[in-house]
Image (cartoon, helix red, strand yellow):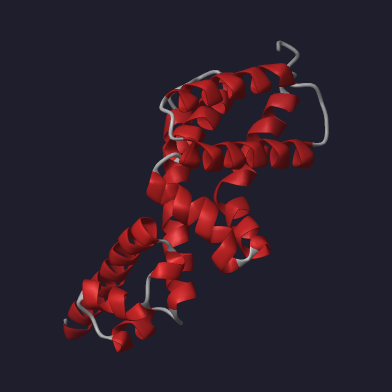
Amino acid sequence: MAGTVRARQREETRRRLLRVSRELFAGQGYGAVGLAEIVAAAEVTKGALYHHFAGKADLFRAVLREVQREVGARVAAAADTRQDPWERLTTGCQEFLTAATGPGIQRIMLIDGPAVLGWHEWRGMDEESSAHHLAEALEDLMAQGVLPRQPVAPLAHLLSGAMNEAALWLAVSGRAADLADTRAALARILEGLRGGG
């Protein structure tokens, strides 16, 4: 019983560290947040933080994974509202743009993520969380004859890169109309893939 209580307390501490860190990283950026500020806001000791995470970068990595999972879940939920495979792809892509426009999401996932962890690790995490789903969707559409047969990996990377870049641009554009314009541009690009653009 005591072990169960301790395990629950450890998990609550871990969740609190993730929640507080995410708020701080999203609001100030990784570079502006120190471990002392994190442990004070979470009301834990540095020892408690180091029990769960190797350091600030490891904590950030866990926050980034959480953000990527949430964005992936939003994309999947939006895509799942459609029966048609083509509409599933286009709806999922559009939802990614919308989900990624949240300032905290952009800063953690698209700005600080590659800067803090390095391009290769960040890209690997992106691949695990969402890029492989995009590649699978494209492969399915090609198998069904909706899209012309072509190498999937370059196409998936081009689309993923374009959507990430668009989300970054939306973060600094400051114009509300830009999201609608970007979504319309993405729709034209996607339609062009199947020869309708």
Location of residue 146 by image quarter: top right
How many labels sit on residues? 0
Left or right of 108? Residue 153 is: right
Q: Residue at x 56, y 24 (%)?
A: 90
Q: Residue at x 72, y 17 (%)?
A: 192
Q: Residue at x 58, y 27 (%)?
A: 89
Left or right of 139? Residue 72 is: left
Quadrant the C terminus occupies: top right
186 or 3, which is in the foreground?
186
Residue 129 visible? The answer is yes
6 or 59, which is in the foreground?
59
What x and y, as percent, mark residue 47? 31, 89
Farthest bottom residue? Answer: 47
Q: Residue at x 37, y 56 (%)?
A: 26
Taking 141 as reference, is 162 above or below it?
Answer: below
What x and y, as percent, mark residue 170? 50, 36
Residue 69 visible? The answer is no
Quadrant the N terminus occupies: bottom left
Taking 192 as reference, is 2 above or below it?
Answer: below
What x and y, as percent, mark residue 79? 48, 29
Taking 134 as reference, is 125 above or below it?
Answer: below
What x and y, as percent, mark residue 171? 47, 41
23 or 79, which is in the foreground?
23
Left or right of 114? Residue 158 is: right
131 or 38, which is in the foreground?
38
Farthest top residue? Answer: 196
